[in-house]
Image (cartoon, rainbow, N blue to C red):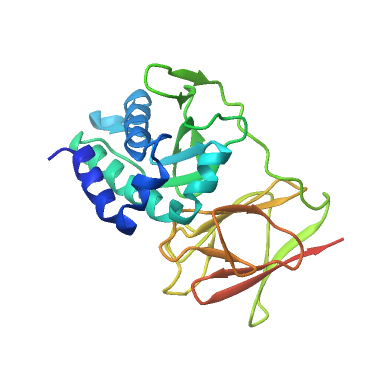
């Protein structure tokens, strides 16, 4: 049984076939996995000793409509895609840095049924973008290529401020510019000793003017003010729940 066939088999039993209903008439997870495999193939790099390195981090941008429909299942789908991509890479005898990571995000400007896959080599501290453009997949027979336009997160608070997370026991975690991964694994920048938190649970992106929280396909999900989220711009006072840990988002200045 091929990787794609095993992937389809697992999807059949996932949340009682909800995926089949969500993706009826629009983008299908198998198309996403196909595009991820093409990205790995397109971005191979030969290392010393003849080993072949391929990207281990894949970001899936869905159209706003598809993303809203998928939101309740995004974490489960991200895990299945990561597992299947890891199987595919293993079958090819390729090399990756650490775990295969899949993140599902909202891609403004994409039409319903379209999605964008971008691939990166994540080394545990920094992300090294691949040089080739990401594949922008549309309906069968209509491929195109995206030259890295992307989208900006929703407007948030102003710039030049000191932002931090405060835990329930009073611990403070200042946020630096750039990306901060929260989790309990070695690859996390902010490590929390909570068994309900995944090794790479969520990511905070701070550009100096706003902070966007993105769930990284975690097992137990990420909550903000009691609502499960896949990606959201944070506002001062927002309560973030990961596992049994609660963090309050604070802004000074």
- Which quadrant would the N terminus be assigned to in this image? top left
Number of on-image labels: 0
- Place of residue 70 in the rendered image (x, y in percent of width and height, measured from the top left): 47, 48
- Place of residue 128 in the rendered image (x, y in percent of width and height, measured from the top left): 50, 36
Residue visible at 52% across and 44% down in the picture: 67
- Place of residue 86 in the rendered image (x, y in percent of width and height, measured from the top left): 28, 44
Give the residue at the far right of this rendering.
Answer: 253
- Place of residue 3 in the rendered image (x, y in percent of width and height, measured from the top left): 21, 40
Say if 179 sits above or below 224 in the image.
above
Q: Nearer the viewer, residue 141 or 177?
A: 141
- Which quadrant would the C terminus be assigned to in this image? bottom right
Give the residue at the far bottom of this rendering.
Answer: 169
Q: Nearer the viewer, residue 34 or 45?
A: 34
User: On the rendered structure, is 57 left or right of 12?
Assistant: right
Q: Nearer the viewer, residue 131 or 233?
A: 233
Residue visible at 20% across and 33% down in the picture: 92
Say if 1 sits above or below 144 in the image.
below
- The reply to whether residue 98 is in sight is no
- The reply to whether residue 233 is in sight is yes
Say if 49 sits above or below 200 in the image.
above
Residue visible at 38% across and 46% down in the picture: 21
């Amino acid at each position: 049984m091929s990787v794609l066939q095993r992937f389809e088999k697992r999807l059949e039993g996932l949340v009682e076939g909800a995926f089949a209903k969500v993706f009826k008439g629009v983008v299908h997870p198998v198309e996403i996995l196909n595009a991820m495999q093409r990205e790995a193939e397109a971005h191979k790099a030969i290392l010393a000793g003849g080993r072949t390195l391929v990207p281990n981090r894949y970001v899936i941008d869905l159209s706003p409509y598809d993303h809203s429909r998928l939101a309740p299942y995004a974490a489960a789908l991200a895990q299945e895609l990561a597992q299947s991509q890891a199987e595919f890479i293993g079958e090819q005898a390729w090399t990756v840095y650490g775990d295969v990571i899949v993140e599902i995000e909202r891609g403004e400007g994409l039409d319903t049924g379209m999605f964008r896959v971008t691939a990166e080599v994540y080394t545990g501290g920094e992300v090294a973008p691949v040089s080739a453009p990401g594949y922008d997949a549309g309906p069968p027979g209509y491929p195109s290529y995206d030259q890295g336009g992307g989208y900006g997160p929703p407007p948030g608070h102003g710039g030049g401020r000191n932002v931090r997370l405060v835990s329930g026991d009073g611990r403070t975690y200042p946020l630096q510019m750039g990306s901060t991964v929260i989790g309990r694994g070695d690859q996390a920048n902010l490590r929390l000793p909570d068994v309900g938190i995944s090794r790479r649970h969520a990511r905070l992106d701070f550009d100096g003017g706003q902070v966007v929280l993105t769930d990284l396909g975690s097992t137990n999900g990420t909550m903000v003010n009691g609502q499960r989220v896949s990606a959201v711009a944070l506002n001062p006072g927002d309560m973030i729940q990961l596992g049994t840990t609660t963090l309050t988002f604070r802004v000074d200045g």
